[in-house]
Amino acid sequence: MANPIDPAQTSPSSTSPPPAPATQQSTPDMSSQQPSSQPPQPSNGASKPAKPPKQPKSKDAPPAAGGAPGEEKLSPAELKKKAKAEKAARRAKERAEREASGGAGPGPNAAPPKKGSIGSGAGGKEAPGQPYKGQRHRRGSGTQPSATEQKKKQEDKNVAVFGHLYGQPRRTTIAGAGKEVHPAVLALGLQMRDYVVCGSSARCVATLLAFKRVIEAYTTPLGTSLSRHLTTHLSHQITYLSTCRPLSISQGNAIRALKLAISSIDPSVPEASAKATLSDFIDNFIREKITVADQVIATSAAEKIQDGDVIVTFAGSSIVKQTLLTAYKQGKKFRVSIIDSRPLFEGKSLARTLANAGLEVQYSLVNGISHAIKDATKVFLGAHAMTSNGRLYSRVGTALVAMSAKERAGGVEVPVIVCCETVKFTDRVALDSIVVNEIADADELVPSQPLKQVTGLPDLTDEADAKKGDSKKGGNKAAANAPPAESTPLPEGSSPLANWKETPNLQLLNIMYDVTPAEYVDMVVTEMGSLPPSAVPIVHRMSTNL
Amino acid sequence: MASTTPAPSEAAKPFDIVATYNELLRSDPDLTMPIAAIEALVLLLTHSPSSTISETLDLLEKSTAHLKKSIPNPIGLSAGTDLFQRYLITTLQRPGQLGPAGDFNAIRAHLLSNGRLFIRRAKESRDKIAAFGRGFVRDGSTVLTNGGSRVVASLLQKAADEKGGPSAVRFRVIYVLAPAKDSSAEPEGMETVRALRAKGVPVATIPESAVAYSLGKADIVIVGAEGVVENGGIVSRMGTYQIGLLAKAMAKPFYAVAESHKFVRLYPLGQYDLPIEQRVIDFNTEEDITDGHKLQSVAHSSDVVDFTPPHLISALITDSGVLTPSAVSEELIKIWF
């Protein structure tokens, strides 16, 4: 395979080889940005695809033209070519790695191609798609010594156990998105990426609404029928969305339902009415599966709240918020204790909303869980998904809260109640949080909260700086857990983790979800009634069959 | 509504559902609460002259609410009324002769006859359960049980009868007897004890305080239930929960026996989450006692119940088979959707 591709690529050498040089010249800020902020290899893959097509232009025309038009130029054919180039590059890279690891003997073989890619355009094969970080480093700094060393460095940054989860990095720009992608979807993708639209239900609703606009703007091309073509048209949108952030279970379920609805449209139905049907379907789906379901859940979950309760909840679930507000409106007197965690701090907005509504709210981070759970009487949790073995898949930290509630020392165990729409049920099973999960950009963990000090500690600064220097040299793992004493005096805006990528032996893991065992869940409140977790597969089967 | 329509002669005096329910329970000792409730509702329908579907449903709803309110512990009862109501609605929604388009009198006749059929089936279910359950009582084993559950009694008697004559399963029973309400009456369950002894089954009776002591000699625990709730736990006579806890601690299998019409749409999270008011724990000072009159309402009444959570139950023996607690919600969902 590799051989046939190579010639093809090299022959239109004007297109593919230039990538490396072109990036450096025409988009200097891009190249500089990549090495520094986006070391995780994948980002390269995403942003780069956009570039190769650009290059030809920059060759022909002055490089300045490179930016916007280049993105649009991406035709399917070009996409395909790009994909091929990437594949070839990956393969070449693998080969190089293998040889490099082989030792000194094969070394010479491995080296030449690399050099080529750095220096000239000859290495076209490699340059276009390098999904691997190492290459980027090389390109960025240019002076890195040997391939092996670089490689080691890149691989270190991925936590080995979760290695399979580091897929493509999240898309950072709309560059390179296919021209079929509707602007509403483009915007939504970035919003989801930046957690502007966050939360399983919110993402599901937003996706459906965006797709509604896509369908409204859609016209069936000649020679095909709506029921056949619209699904493929939607798949482009879906692919784009999933490069921004992996799709949630609820999104997946909603999309499946929508596709089913599309494919069941009679081809003889006129396009306008077919589109109207689909819009109605989407509206109904949102209403039945989410809006009304939420109301039903909130009402029935609120019944479980009694006067004098202390409700513990984790992060910011919209359905839990609704439940608590409902109970409060019913005149129940209870206290809410919100447990939150870095880096998203979703509980803050929940705390604000509840406090504004007049509830008594206590807010603490997950480090304070043992304290917060002490006087809890009930735990309410939101869900990202419920798996078929009754386990709860939710924001990372949930399992810890549930466990603390159930294994609370020296007390009655606290009931753990999960509020979850059936649209979040999945027939997958989860045995642990490793096999299926989502890894977010580790850089999200870096920013430290600016610490406001009442008492200036001017003297300490120097000391700490010195200390910092030491620790840098020594095991820098310590820096991650550095006590505040060490981190406070750091120069403003910098975090002890700021240079984590350059720090040897330091990995950051920003995992998004965890799995709570079914034994820790007493009750799942759904719009179809309250269930034990073991009944999730039955209800899922019923709600998908109906 | 019903009272304003011209009433047939037998409805001259208004039909009292509560009295009917109590009368039914009293007259037939074999009757369980849900069945008595259903029978009372069927009787209500025969007595009421309602002529439209919505009128019938409305009447049913009102009487159910009334009945529930006037009975101190409506958990078992509500299983019956809910089931009947649900059954009615699904029948009425079904297309065809008996659907909303059909002749209402035909519908009513159908409902009434089916209601009777339902009651008969429910009574038969006890035999079915006994058939399923007797396999659990093995030769040479000792069974610990409590309370006055009729279905447990029939199960044990069936086991004693098995194959008849000398080859019957030989087993022993430890019967936990709660003290009777007033000292003159015999404790609940004494009847079963006598029946078993008559069949040659050795029975030991122990007080509730001796459960932990005696459990070491028992091989399995079988208890009855007033209601089976959605998570597979049971609502049952006070004292069952502690037997469950002890059985778990001693790793003895704990089986609950219940007819499937006792499945309730209820999801208690713990002892104090039951939808009934029972003043079991009643704090008093000397002053209150001298004041005096409130004292009688406490734990002695045979109506008090507790909740045994599903993780203490090894299996539920029902007329639809032997179920694990987690299968109960599946059964309930099947009934309700």
Image (cartoon, grey):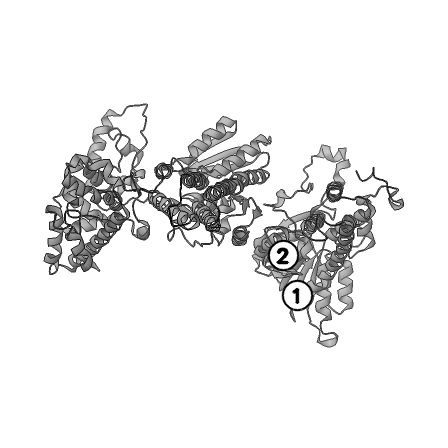
The disc label shown at residue B132, or none: 1
Does residue A236 appear in this view? yes
The disc label shown at residue B212, or none: 2
Q: Position of residue B216 (x, y in %)?
A: 61, 62
* Distance from Cα at disc 2 to Cα at disc 1: 28 Å
**Amino acid under label 2?**
Ala
Q: Tell me the SS state at disc 1.
A: helix
What is the crowding at mark 2: few (fewer than 14 residues within 10 Å), some, or many (at least 20)? some
Residue B323: name its quadrant: bottom right
Does residue A502 appear in this view? no
Q: Would residue A359 appear left or right of B4 to someone viewing this image?
A: left
Q: Would residue A134 appear left or right of A529 to someone viewing this image?
A: left
Question: Quadrant of the image for the N terminus of chain B?
Answer: top right
Closer to the eye: label 2 or 1 = 1
Q: Would residue A153 appear left or right of B96 to someone viewing this image?
A: left
**Amino acid under label 1?**
Phe
Q: Is disc 2 in contact with disc 1, using a CB cutoff of under 8 Å?
A: no
The answer to whether B144 is drawn above or below residue A397 in the figure is below
For marks 2 and 1 on the same chain, the one whose residue lies earlier in the sequence: 1
Q: Residue at x 54, y 50 (%)?
A: A543
